[in-house]
Amino acid sequence: MGDEDDIERSVIQRIEDFDDPGQEWRRLFSELYGTFLLVIVAAGGGMMSQAFPNTISRQAAVVAPGLMVMGVILFMGRVSGAHLNPAVSIAFALRRDFPWWRVPGYIAVQLAGATLACLFLRAVIDVSAKYGSNYPAHGYSSGAAFWMEALLTLGLVSVILGTASGAQNVGVFGAIAVGGYIALAGLWGSPISGTSMNPARTFGPDLVGRDFSQYWVYVAGPLVGAVVAVGAAFILRGPGGGRAGSGAAQGVLRTRLDRPDQA
């Protein structure tokens, strides 16, 4: 019983740590850094293809962000939940796994991380950030791209919420599931919409490239998909707000009361 009591106390301490405002700066830095790395790869694929024609295939460009997200979840998911995406932060809040007061800060640093990534890419590669953004494919309407983004984000957020229900997105299973889905969605859906699924990912290159002509597609589509995914999660698993989902959404920062073997 002693070990079980120790584990229970550790879990309670971690839950209390979720609401510790003193740790918020760590979470915000984590989201900024993680989104920066994601957009370096996601926007960098298109920009590198422009700078070095015929060296990067579409398949490589769309699989790379999935691999990056997999790595980011593994190294920082325990800190902030590794949202990296305003649609994911909003979905977790709607699911009651994440406090609404934290959403504006997360979105702000996600947008900032994406912008910093594109400024870096433009300075190093010396091509317009427009080549790293997302636009509807030639011959397809903005409406078609919107519905594609909504559908793809529905799948992405469903995977994230599903793995979060077992606190898996702070570990290997969640990383593989989310990263694998992003790669698969890119392979299938990128010809029509570019497979953003993330308002921050598209915001960075649009801001640096000064072209917001189609940005509404990459805000409205992911948000609609995320809201529908929250509804689907309720049908599948009932209301959120449980211990596992909250732990996955908010991170599990280690405190001095944690035992080393539980860190």
Image: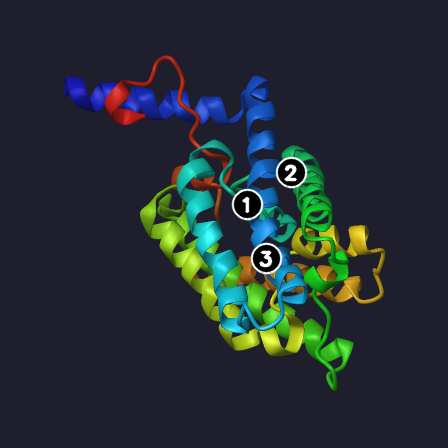
Separation (CA) of disc 2 from disc 3: 19 Å
**Residue 178: which disc?**
none
Q: What amino acid does circle 1 point to? A: His
Position of 218 with respect to 228 (left or right) is right
Callout 1 touching callout 2 (CB < 8 Å): yes
Rendered residue at 72%/64% (across/down): 131
User: Which of 208/54 is in front?
Assistant: 54
Residue 115 placement (x, y as % from top left): 72, 45
Is residue 91 visible in the rendered image? The answer is no
| Picture layout, residue 90 above or below residue 52 | above
Rendered residue at 58%/37% (across/down): 33
Is residue 141 visible in the rendered image? The answer is yes
Separation (CA) of disc 1 from disc 3: 16 Å
User: Which of 116/202 is in front?
Assistant: 116
Which quarter of the figure has residue 171?
A: top left
Callout 1 touching callout 3 (CB < 8 Å): no
| Picture layout, residue 218 above or below residue 126 | below
Quarter occupied by the N terminus:
top left
Q: What amino acid does circle 3 point to? A: Ala
Q: Which residue is mark 2?
A: 106
**Residue 83: which disc?**
1
Q: Which residue is mark 3?
A: 42
User: Which of 224/73 is in front?
Assistant: 73
Q: What amino acid does circle 2 point to? A: Tyr
Q: Nearer the viewer, mark 1 or mark 3?
A: 3
Q: Nearer the viewer, mark 2 or mark 3?
A: 3
